[in-house]
Image: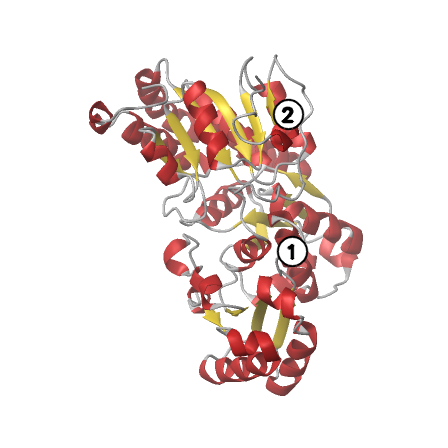
Amino acid sequence: MSETTVAISEREQFIATKGRRKNSLKCDADSIAGCVSQRACVYCGARVVLNPVTDAIHLVHGPVGCASYTWDIRGSLSSGSELYRNSFCTDLREQDIIFGGEKKLAKTIDELVAKHPAKLMFVYSTCIVGVIGDDLAAVCKAAALRNNLEVIPVESSGFIGNKSAGYRAACEALLKLIAPVDRAQAAASRTINYLGDFNLAGEAWIIRDYLAQMGVQINTVFTGDSTSATLKGAANASLNIVQCAGSMNYLAAQLQELYGIPYMQVSFLGIEDTAKSLRSIAAAMGGGAIRAKAEVLIRRETDRVLPYINKFREKFIGKKAAVYVGGGFKAISLIKQFREIGIEVVMIGTQTGRREEYDTIHELVAEGTVILDDANPAELERFMTSQGAHLLVGGVKERPLAYKLGLAFIDHNHDRKHPLSGYDGAVNFAQEVYSTLCSPVWKYTAGKGGG
């Protein structure tokens, strides 16, 4: 019997088992109709990227349910404005859907500008707007002239693709903000943009501090703790570093094409990848004194946190982990990070992984590891239990599934409130694994995974 028969046969191309099945995995395709995917929608992808822009008004043009994405389920922090913590909505209803929602959108924009002085507004389209055909761009353009602020439409209607399409819609909106500069002067600035960090629990601040110790200054972060002013000046940087490749590789490529800013992939998850990324940044910024400072930082921090990591490692002998996260690059880092604490990853999947990332995952994992793209709950349950996983790393949608199966769980999504980046983040990760995996509560459950 096929391994995917328990779900639907159309999913076979999206599932691989190292050593037993094909190496190539199909990815970046729309979810199969009738299959309840764990992957989020186009609008969610756009909102994930843009919501941490702190001084912007975020207006959802659609039903009020789509506006439930508010500050209390997102761990992004701000050092200034708190305007982004609100979630405004046009609250489209039956009459609006029949006769169109453009007038209601224009009126809502005017009311919000009157109540909340701001220089920037993002207006997100949703599924229903795509169906009724409201001209979002025209309404935003007229509202911008009328109210003297930037009103940027985010074309994130449903039915135009998957979550990756939402990432791209957000990047297109950001590109409209960035102002052209004198590139010869900007290239000499020796500053960097940090792309794909959303300052969850202050993670962007942790990395900013590391780089400052190396003598490297951040120009702006996309989009954690960012403002309309800092984003406008993004073209002043001499290098872009990308943490979340799934959401920001498109923007990085566009910034290279439009402004000649080179970019490189980094990861600050785990000791190994953090050290590797700091060295890569130092080399890209000229090496020399920066590289020397980076080595001092890496040695000091590694020596400080390794005893804690090794202490936890002793507790995890024989344990197995399952991973289901948004992007492929995060999944790759998690495989390495679990190795650091002595845990084998036996199932791994992503929502928006790319082919080259799945190739790397295939090289990293052990024989017999199951690899999935855009999985559904039935597949996650089947493979977590058959692989004997003791722990699942995922997001808010995967948490109930893990607990129902009697498995430990770690939140690695945007709703968490604790930092997992850098050296202290590595200790936090090991501590969280210990707290959930070694909890006495599992003695009283009928675990269906590794028990």
The reply, left or right, for residue 49 in relation to residue 65 is right
Can residue 275 be seen from the camera position used here?
no
Q: Position of residue 138 (x, y in %)?
A: 70, 77
What residue is rendered at 67% in x and 19% in y? 22
Q: Amino acid at mark 2?
A: Thr
Please tell me which residue lies in front, 100 or 40.
100
Q: Position of residue 143 (x, y in %)?
A: 62, 82
Q: Which image quarter holds the C terminus?
A: top left
Q: Residues within 10 Å of mark 1 (few under 14, many from 20)?
A: some
Q: How many angstroms separate mark 1 from mark 2 (CA)?
A: 30 Å
- The correct choice, above or below, for 262 with respect to 402 in the image is below
Q: Earlier in the sequence, mark 1 or mark 2?
A: 1
Q: Position of residue 258 (x, y in %)?
A: 79, 56
- The correct choice, above or below, for 444 with respect to 40 in the image is above
Q: How many marks?
A: 2
The residue that label 2 is drawn on is 360
Q: Position of residue 336 (x, y in %)?
A: 51, 24
Please tell me which residue lies in front, 133 or 422.
133
Q: Residue 6 — which label?
A: none
Label 2's element?
helix
What residue is rendered at 43% in x and 43% in y? 397
Quarter of the image where one finds residue 384: top left
Can residue 396 be seen from the camera position used here?
yes
The residue that label 1 is drawn on is 159
What residue is rendered at 54% in x and 58% in y? 47
Label 1's element?
loop
Q: Amino acid at mark 1?
A: Phe
The reply, left or right, for residue 44 in relation to residue 170 is left
Look at discs 1 and 2 and give the one toward the viewer. Answer: 1
